[in-house]
Every structure is written in C-alpha cells, then in structure tokens.
Amino acid sequence: MKNILPILTVILVIVAVWYAAAIKMNAAWTYAQANRAGTEVTFSEVVRDTLNQERPVLPAPHQVAAELWATTVEKKITSKRSLVFHGWVTLSATLLGFAIGTTAGILLAIGITHNRAMELGVMPWAIASQTIPILAIAPMIIVVLNSMGISGLIPKSIIAAYLSFFPVAVGMVKGLRAPDAMQLDLMRTYSASDNQTFWKLRLPSSMPYLFASLKVGVAASLVGTIVAELPSGATRGLGARLLSGSYYGQTVQIWSALFAAALLAASLVIIVGVIEKITLRRMGMAA
C-alpha cells in the first residue's frame, strides 16, 4: 500500500492538471459559439461543454478512456477501427525490427570489443548514423525499398532496427568490457582462450548491461515503426491511426492511439524486464 500511494498521488495530480488544461484550451470554442449565438454561458456550462466537445483541442481524460474502450473492447479485433488490430500490425514490425537491431548491435559490439581496427573504423560511423533525424531517413528508405519491390513489413522493420541497434551495441560494448584486469588475468592463469574468456567471463558480465539496453531498444523500435508508418501511406498500424486522425481533426482518436502506443511500449519493456529477472536468476546474478 505504501508503494502504491505515491503512484496514485502522481496519477491524480496529472489527471487534475489534464482536466484543467482541457477546460482552458477548449473554452475558446465554447465562448466563440456563445458569441455567435448572442448568448452568455456560465462557468458550469463552459466546463460541461469543454469536457464533451466532439473535436476538442485537448480531449479530456474520460474521452480518451471511452475511445480506448470503444476501439479495443467493443470492436472486433479484425475491424480496421480496432486498436487491437492496428496495434498488432505495429507490434509485428516492431518485434522483427527489434530482433534485427538486437542481432546487429550484439554482433557489432563483439567485433568492436575484439578488434581495435573495427572500433576505430566502425564505431564513429555508428555514432554518426544516429545524428540523422529518423523523420528524414524514413521516407528515403521506404521510397528506395518500394522501388525495389519491397514493401509492407520489411521497410518498417528496417527503420525500427535502425533505431534499436545503437543502444544495444553501446550497452553490449560496455558490458563486454565490464570485467576488470584482475578477472582477465585470472582467466589467463587458467590458460583460457579468447573464446573461453568470452563465453565464461565477458558474456555473463554483459547481461545486466544488455538487458538495460534492450529496454531502450524495444521502445525505440516501436517509435521507429510508428514513424515509418507515417510517410508510407499505410492504412494499418498505430501510425496510420495517428495520421488519419490528424487528417480529419479527430483529436480523441489521435490521443487514444498515442495512449495505445504508450501502453504497448510499456508492456514490451515489462516483458523484457521479466525475461531479465529470470535470466539473471538462473545465472546466479540476482536474488
């Protein structure tokens, strides 16, 4: 109970601020309508109208919650209006991109750790690649791949992998270099080969760093997938849901899709955290 109370307090404060902001930002439309009709509105009428507008500037929390319920529970998961349907489309590309990015990041980290020339030659380019805005590179990747006849899941997965490989690579490099000189000297006294040192010392030592970076990487993969859905003209996925909402001024739809994406990202991070606890416990690195 003591752990839940601070969380509930923060949530209540956020909801209260959100309601106040919704009233403030949506009041202009209410007053404008009243002026056109030549009538006056009381504060209670303003509050009631601002919290129930069809296309508000800032939707109220209960409007977003109602939209989430309507598009997840009340809609069939095969319906194109279902956030479960769109969430699965985004999730499939996210998981594939995350798998590609994780594999690439781990292999790059291993190469950098064992090869000084690779560290000097590849790592600067990996760092430089992250300075390119994803909004600029995503349309380029999609256009090039579409010209090659590659569309659908693969382009989105590549963009997701682009965002996820770097945190994994950096975290894995840090982890593989975590063993200190005394531990490495001890392996040498046992006449351990480089492969034995890697599997028995470096890799186990890197696990906490790897899982920390995987949590960042999986969230980045989801962001990459959603960004990839925006310029591709996709009709499926959470990014497409955001785009269609912006086209038609459906702010409630936009916010519900944003919350669905946030919940999906949080779920993925939690799953990675559960796998981390199980793995580290089996390796004797956690209680």
Image (cartoon, rainbow, N blue to C red):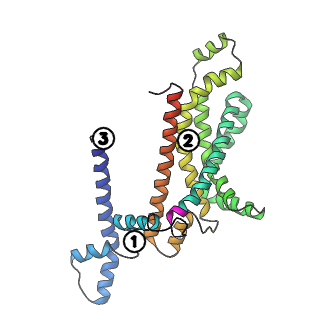
Q: Residue 214, labelled with which disc?
A: 2
The type of residue carrying mark 1 is: Val
Nearest the eye: 239 or 135: 239
Cα separation between marks 1 and 2: 36 Å
Q: Nearer the viewer, residue 193 or 30?
A: 193
In the image, residue 66 above or below residue 40: above
Q: Residue at x 64, y 57 (%)?
A: 156
- Check the image and name the residue furthest to the top: 189
Disc 2 residue type (three-letter): Leu
The residue most toward the right is: 148
As shown in the figure, which amino acid type bears the numbered disc 3?
Asn
Image location of residue 222, percent across then percent down: 56, 53
The residue at 29%/50% (across/down) is: 8
Which residue appears at 38% of the width and 64% of the height? 65
**Residue tagged 1:** 57
CB-based contact (under 8 Å), mark 1 and mark 2: no
Residue stretch in magenta: 78-85
Seen from the viewer's position, the closer of residues 128 and 7 is 7
Rendered location of residue 230, percent (x, y):
59, 64
Quadrant including the N terminus:
top left
Which one is earlier in the sequence, the residue at label 1 or at label 2? 1
Q: Give the alpha-carbon distance from disc 3 to disc 1, as whole Å.
A: 35 Å
